Amino acid sequence: MAEVEEKDLVEILSENIPIDLVKYINHVRAPLAGAIATFSGTTRDTFDGKQVVELRYEAYVPMAVRCIKAICSSARSSWDLHSIAVAHRLGPVPVGETSVFVAISSVHRGDGLDACKFVIDELKASVPIWKKEVYTNGEVWKENSEFMDRRLEFGKTGCVSKDDKVEKNRKTCCGSKVKVADANQTTMEEELLSHSELKQ
């Protein structure tokens, strides 16, 4: 188990620290890996006709790291992977800069490409990282479309455990970004729900 954890690198970067793409690609590089699949999410300059100045990200870091590690574990249970690296920035991310980066190495490209798509889709749908779009004429907190699609599953389980298995076609890993707890119990998930409501 420790060997697998050494092959996975998950980092939530503090404000104003850019993502070093080469660092994460080098982390997953290996002689047995015939493929390195990557995804780089960058800030675009427009959205729905509005000019974007930057994106701003906030996260509940301990839970975000735990959820991303669970996503990596789920990916490993479905595809034959060597190493995984995931990095996400916090704070402002100007136009053209990378806010999230995923790198996955595998013996064959199919496994790496499929797993890379799975990891970024699950991260967007379920990890407690919030995004504000800042325009030249205002700003708004945005929910990812993957999270909106997952709303029907609101209230289901949070991050999967390391022992959970995922089928190759499974579309969920960490459930929703917020989880409703029992009425008499205060949890981190309830705090996340409150945090999310404050942004609306």
Image (tube, grey):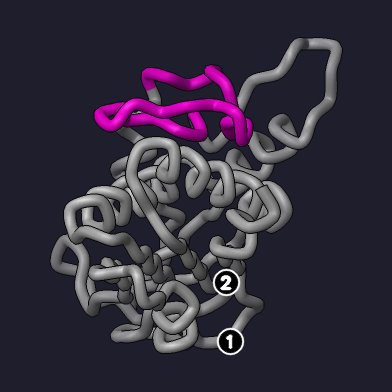
Whether residue 5 is visible: yes
Was residue 197 drawn as part of the magenta stretch in this picture?
A: no
Residue depicted at 73% across the width and 53% down the height: 62
* Number of numbered discs visible in the structure rendering: 2
Q: Upstream in the sequence, badge 2 or badge 1?
A: 1
Residue closer to the observer: 26 or 46 = 26
**Residue 109, percent across and down?**
19, 60
In this rendering, would 72 be left or right of 111? right
Is 60 situated above or below 6? above
Magenta-colored segment: predominant secondary structure: loop
**Residue 145, percent across and down?**
29, 43
Residue depicted at 57% across the width and 66% down the height: 9
Amino acid type of disc 1? Asn
Is 97 situated above or below 12? below
**Mark 2 crowd level (few <14, some 14–19, many ≥20, 10 Å Cα):** many
Range drawn in magenta = 152-175
**Residue 50, percent across and down?**
21, 70
Is 128 situated above or below 140? above
Q: Which residue is mark 2?
A: 90
Which residue reaches farthest left?
A: 49
Residue closer to the observer: 35 or 73 = 35
Which residue reaches farthest front?
A: 32
Q: Which residue is mark 1?
A: 16
Whether residue 128 is visible: no
Instruction: Kindly report the distance in space between the C-alpha atoms of the residues bearing marks 2 and 1.
Output: 7 Å
**Residue 45, percent across and down?**
23, 79
Amino acid type of disc 2? Leu
Which residue reaches farthest top?
A: 183
